[in-house]
Image (spheres, helix red, strand yellow):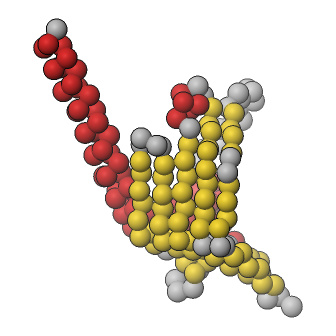
Amino acid sequence: MKKLFKTLGYVAASIVGLVLLIMIIAPIVAKNYVQSNSNELIGRQIYVKNIRLNLFLPKLSINDFCVKEQDGETDFLRFDNLTVRIGIAQLLAGKINIKRIHLKSLNLRVEQDSTGFNFDDIIAHFKNDSDTLAAEPADTSKSTLEINLNDIRLINSKISYADNSV
């Protein structure tokens, strides 16, 4: 019996160690991948200072995030912190329960001129990606996926729109 508890202790410690390792390595890999491949992902440069993942809460935090304009100099979208918490128990039941979305110091600049908006290139980038995929028949079956969103906050944020076509 003593040997069983010792073995279970080693297994539990290994699982906790693996989860901690994932929590440390996954955000670093994600940050490096997004920054290195942002032009391929959305057609613009993305900068991220820090990503943190806590699988015990579960919580994801992204700090100092920025998407540049096409010129590569001007900020299109920037925020200081995005925190997302999800309910893990509901996820196991096939439901998505987002407990919290807090977005701090968002600054989004939307501009329009006679040719369109300053984000049209991002939309075109995704449209071109989907055009290259093989056409698949639409799934007409009903989905029972339930999504709950709670506690959504924009804190000290600014969304600006400028019509430069006039």
Residue 149's image quarter? Answer: top right
Residue 142: percent from the left, percent from the top? 75, 27
Q: Is residue 24 left or right of residue 47?
A: left
151 in relation to 112, above or below: above
**Going by the picture, which residue comes out furthest to the top?**
1
- Which residue, as the protein is rendered here, is positioned at the far left? 3
> In the figure, 108 relative to 154: above or below?
below
Q: Foreground residue, 100 or 115?
A: 100
Q: Quadrant of the C terminus?
A: bottom right
Residue 7: percent from left, percent from top? 17, 20
Residue 122 shows in the view = no
Which residue is the extreme one toward the bottom? Answer: 166
Left or right placement of residue 35 versus residue 156 in this view: left
Residue at the (14%, 13%) spot, across then down: 2
Quadrant of the drawing holding the N terminus: top left
Q: Is residue 11 visible?
A: yes
Q: Where is residue 16 shown, x and y percent of the image? A: 29, 36
Q: Classify residue 163 by image quadrant.
A: bottom right
Question: What residue is drawn where x is 30% and y is 52%?
Answer: 25
The residue at 69%/33% (across/down) is 146
Q: Residue at x 26, y 28 (%)?
A: 12
Q: How many marks?
A: 0
Q: Nearer the viewer, residue 165 or 56?
A: 56
Question: In the image, residue 86 lies at what x, y percent?
Answer: 56, 43
